[in-house]
Image (spheres, rainbow, N blue to C red):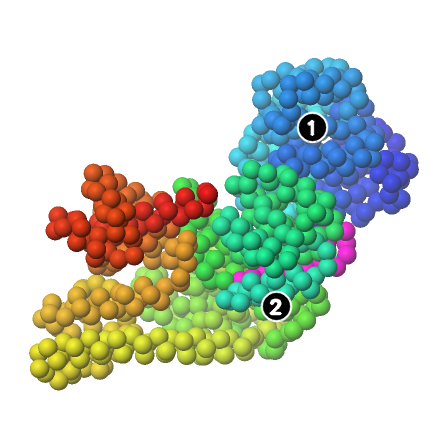
């Protein structure tokens, strides 16, 4: 056993600090006693010291498992700067350098060796490890970023799962697992996957009191708001974006506006060079995807702005936590957009494992709950990690600009009672449907239309019930299953509310009514525009037939068309005022106007498919033909063809050769090269009657997508 009474002296000698941070000393003492450990400390809390100091005080070598080269480099540089024997072995080293470092290890000159999990478990390294054990000994395996072992964590890495071999192969060597973020589920998974033996678990508070949290709705002017926020902040910062394209776009704009900004994503060859410039203050802002993450130990980052929605609350906490590692005031701002939700939903849909999809969907919904929450942001974040935060933090937008607080105890009792009567087997949407008296198929299927709680909440809107449901979750007054299904469960606190032992106070955003009013105004304007287009078409047809317009369709029928916006003849025929004859006579003409209007009012993004296009893409990838997709979606084949054409132009994964035979595609491409891609008519005239507009439109979409790729690469 290593004596611990002089730990403060060792701390000063090796690292220059006079006192330990909270929790560090006890962890180090247990590590010195060869105890398995699970250490959860927030970013900047000093968890690295918890394995570094024991490594220096014990004879032998500490092997540190690290997932990223950048992380290894950063920690080794810091240790070497303190005169400590540390090194790493990874794929960046040439043969001579690797041999030199191996010799230094066997000569006892190295106290900490950083390796990736793949290298550690490789046959070649395992042979070297046996030599290390015989000659200098191994004092422990420190698994850094241990949340990577869990599929419930925010950065799951399958190779981390294999680290369980360490316990089987080297049962006498202690294992220290360390991470900045881990929910109770992830903690349990880490212990199980790494086969820790009766580990001591140290869980520090997740509260980063120096970070101010805020959420801003993303609008057309959000870039200007981002620019202004950056100008108002001192020092360096990070802007996270969801895609490489968005990273490049924001970086270029910031540079044009005089901000020293650099981009970071997996497609940049010199990522490490940009990272170095940022760490060295040669650049003030790093605009990055989540590829820029672990190992960024720059302590003086003053702000982290999420320009796009993060995929989970855990990753948001981890990324925003890169600000203010020095304990000084820092800012976290999230720009919230429903368009981002569709994008992430699409990415989730690309996962092959249904279980992974379910988990990812739950994680996304938790981020949405945070963004739309009206209570203290800190309460929501800490509650996610199972930590209760009581009181007003006075360091988030909701606390600094509080919304009116109202007593919703009675409504909460109704809500919780409904959860109980539904046998705690359903999520929030179903509970709200029951409360509001829905007669949906699902409600009736389970007999919930017969419950006493059915319809007792008709006086509140779905959004108001959702606000209450979120508040109950955030305040710990109801629980949610963590298996991805988001099933609501009663807990001890729920019963204190139901028994009238506790009141429920929630913040109500009365501005929601203004937002809804604005949305309704927008909808009315759009509805009026479509109504006028349909009236114009009706007048044209009526004039051709020399009859009054109302003979074709009454105004009331046109209004229903506007309201429902049917996309197929079947749906068109179901409208009041449309019989089978009129559907056959006028259906195509009216549907054409409605479909064109619908397409023109979809979000205009050059490379981001909308929800309907994504649904078409998914069916196409399942091998369905255009006709089969149209039938399944109740759209016209022309609309599906337009979807696929737009997707091709966005370089989405549509198989053009599955839609148009290769020889015909080549002939159409020649016609496009001759006539340009602005109009289909001259292309069709060049090709003649053997080619139809649908296949021309598809090939043009593919051609446009290829042109964009070439422009991007030049």
Q: Is residue 246 left or right of residue 70?
A: left
Most foreground residue, 338 or 586 = 586
**Residue 99, how many percent across, how many down?**
69, 17
**Few, some or many C-alpha atoms within 10 Å of disc 2 (few <14, some 14-19, many ≥20)?**
many
Most foreground residue, 471 or 640 = 640
Is residue 333 in the magenta section? yes
Q: Is residue 88 above or below residue 499?
A: above
Dot 2: what SS?
loop
Disc marking residue 88: 1
**Residue 60, how many percent across, how many down?**
78, 23
Q: Earlier in the sequence, mark 2 or mark 1?
A: 1
Query: Residue at position x 33%, y 54% from top?
Result: 646
Most foreground residue, 364 or 533 = 533
Query: Residue at position x 35%, y 67% from top?
Result: 601
Query: Residue at position x 28%, y 71% from top?
Result: 564
- Residues rendered magenta in the picture: 323-336
Q: Is residue 701 above or below residue 448?
A: above
**Few, some or many C-alpha atoms within 10 Å of disc 1 (few <14, some 14-19, many ≥20)?**
many
Disc marking residue 375: 2
Front: mark 2 or 1: 1
Is any part of residue 179 visible from this angle? no
């Amino acid at each position: 056993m290593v004596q611990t009474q002089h730990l403060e002296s060792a701390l000063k000698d090796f690292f220059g600090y006079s006192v330990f941070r909270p929790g560090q000393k006890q962890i180090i003492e247990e590590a010195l006693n060869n105890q398995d450990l699970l250490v959860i400390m927030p970013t900047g809390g000093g968890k690295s010291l918890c394995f570094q100091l024991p490594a220096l005080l014990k004879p032998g070598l500490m092997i540190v498992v690290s997932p990223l080269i950048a992380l290894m480099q950063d920690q080794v540089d810091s240790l070497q700067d303190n005169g400590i024997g540390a090194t790493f072995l990874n794929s960046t080293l040439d043969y001579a350098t690797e041999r030199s470092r191996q010799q230094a290890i066997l000569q006892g000159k190295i106290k900490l060796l950083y390796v990736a999990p793949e290298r550690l478990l490789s046959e070649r390294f395992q042979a070297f490890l046996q030599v290390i054990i015989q000659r200098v000994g191994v004092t422990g395996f420190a698994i850094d970023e241990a949340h990577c072992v869990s599929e419930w964590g925010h950065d799951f890495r399958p190779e981390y799962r294999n680290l369980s071999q360490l316990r089987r192969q080297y049962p006498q060597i202690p294992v220290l697992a360390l991470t900045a973020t881990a929910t109770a589920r992830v903690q349990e998974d880490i212990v199980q996957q790494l086969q820790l033996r009766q580990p001591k678990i140290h869980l520090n508070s997740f509260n980063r009191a120096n970070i101010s949290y805020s959420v801003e709705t993303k609008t057309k002017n959000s870039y200007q708001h981002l620019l202004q926020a950056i100008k108002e902040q001192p020092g360096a910062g990070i802007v996270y974006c969801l895609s490489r394209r968005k990273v490049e776009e924001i970086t270029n704009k910031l540079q044009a506006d005089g901000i020293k900004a650099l981009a970071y994503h997996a497609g940049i060859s010199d990522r490490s060079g940009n990272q170095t410039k940022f760490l060295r203050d040669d650049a003030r802002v790093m605009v990055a995807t989540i590829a820029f993450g672990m190992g960024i130990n720059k302590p003086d980052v003053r702000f982290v702005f999420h320009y796009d929605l993060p995929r989970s609350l855990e990753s948001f906490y981890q990324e925003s936590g890169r600000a203010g590692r020095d304990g000084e005031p820092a800012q976290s701002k999230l720009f919230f957009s429903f368009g981002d939700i569709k994008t992430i939903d699409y990415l989730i849909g690309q996962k092959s494992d249904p279980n992974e999809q379910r988990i990812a969907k739950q994680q996304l919904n938790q981020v949405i709950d945070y963004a739309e929450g009206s209570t203290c942001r800190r309460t929501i974040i800490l509650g996610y990690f199972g930590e209760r935060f009581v009181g007003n933090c006075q360091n988030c937008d909701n606390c600094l600009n509080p919304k009116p607080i109202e007593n919703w105890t009675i409504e909460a009792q109704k809500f919780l009672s409904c959860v109980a009567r539904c046998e705690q087997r359903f999520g929030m949407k179903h509970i709200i449907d029951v409360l509001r008296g829905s007669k949906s198929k699902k409600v009736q299927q389970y007999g919930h239309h017969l419950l006493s709680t059915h319809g007792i909440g008709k006086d509140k809107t779905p959004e108001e019930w959702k606000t209450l449901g979120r508040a109950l979750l955030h305040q710990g007054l109801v629980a949610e299953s963590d298996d991805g299904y988001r099933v609501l469960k009663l807990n001890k606190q729920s019963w204190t509310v139901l028994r009238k032992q506790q009141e429920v106070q929630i913040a109500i955003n009365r501005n929601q009514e203004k937002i809804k009013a604005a949305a309704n105004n927008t909808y009315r304007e759009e509805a009026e525009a479509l109504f006028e287009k349909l009236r114009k078409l009706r007048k044209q047809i009526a004039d051709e037939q020399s009859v009054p317009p109302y003979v074709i369709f009454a105004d009331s029928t046109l209004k229903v068309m506007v309201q429902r916006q049917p996309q197929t003849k079947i749906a068109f025929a179901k409208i009041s005022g449309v019989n089978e004859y009129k559907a056959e006579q006028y259906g195509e003409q009216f549907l054409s106007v409605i479909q064109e209007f619908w397409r023109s009012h979809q979000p205009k993004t050059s490379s981001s498919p909308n929800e309907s296009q994504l649904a078409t893409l998914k069916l196409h990838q399942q091998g369905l033909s255009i006709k089969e997709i149209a039938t399944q979606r109740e759209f016209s084949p022309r609309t599906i063809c337009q979807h696929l054409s737009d997707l091709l132009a966005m370089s989405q994964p549509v198989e053009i050769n599955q839609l148009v035979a290769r020889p015909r595609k080549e002939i159409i491409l020649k016609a496009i090269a001759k006539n340009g891609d602005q109009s289909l008519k001259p292309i069709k005239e060049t090709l003649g009657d053997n080619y139809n507009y649908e296949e021309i439109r598809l090939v043009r979409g593919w051609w446009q997508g290829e042109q964009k790729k070439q422009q991007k690469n030049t």
